[in-house]
Amino acid sequence: MTWLAVLVGGAIGSAARHGINLAAPRLFGTATPYATAAVNMIGSLVIGILAGLLAAERVSMSPTERALVFTGLLGGFTTFSSFMLDGLGLWQAGATSTAIVNLMGQLIVGCVLIYAGYRIGSSPG
């Protein structure tokens, strides 16, 4: 049952990721690196909130539900490998400063958002 949960969650997360890939060029003129940055930041915030909610025992999830959401949905949605590939592509295209700002910015903002999400999720009432 856990494998099915991961499969279903992954399909939903991947479809949502694709939707952001399609929307990014309309919003920003290009998908790279904006689509990847958006999913990584959204994913960091959501996983932080959920981890905080679980830690504060404000929500509970069975092992299958955790697999569906964390491994499947968020794993299919967030894109660390795409993130790294975007960085390499920018670097190889000679946009070294953009590559560094993009990579470091997403890491720093992602850390801040996962912490903020955790605090939101674990705060009382």
Image (cartoon, rainbow, N blue to C red):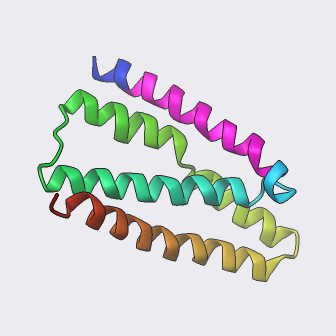
Q: Quadrant of the C terminus?
A: bottom left
Task: Tell me which corner region of the image, top left, top right, bottom left or bottom right, holds residue 22.
Answer: top right
The correct choice, above or below, for 61 with respect to 104 in the image is: above
User: As rendered, which of 31 and 4 lies closer to the eye?
Assistant: 31
**Region in magenta:** 6-25
Q: Residue at x 42, y 34 (%)?
A: 72
Say if the magenta span includes residue 10. yes
Overall secondary structure of the magenta stretch?
helix
Left-right relation of 107 to 4:
right
**Residue 49, percent from left and from top:** 32, 55
**Residue sitting at x 44%, y 23%:** 7
The residue depicted at 88 percent of the width and 69 percent of the height is 93
The spot of residue 78 in percent (x, y) is 53, 48
Residue at the extreme bottom: 97
Q: Residue furthest left?
A: 57
The picture places residue 32, in percent across and down from the top left corner, at: 77, 57
Q: Residue at x 46, y 42 (%)?
A: 75
Q: Nearer the viewer, residue 15 or 121?
A: 121
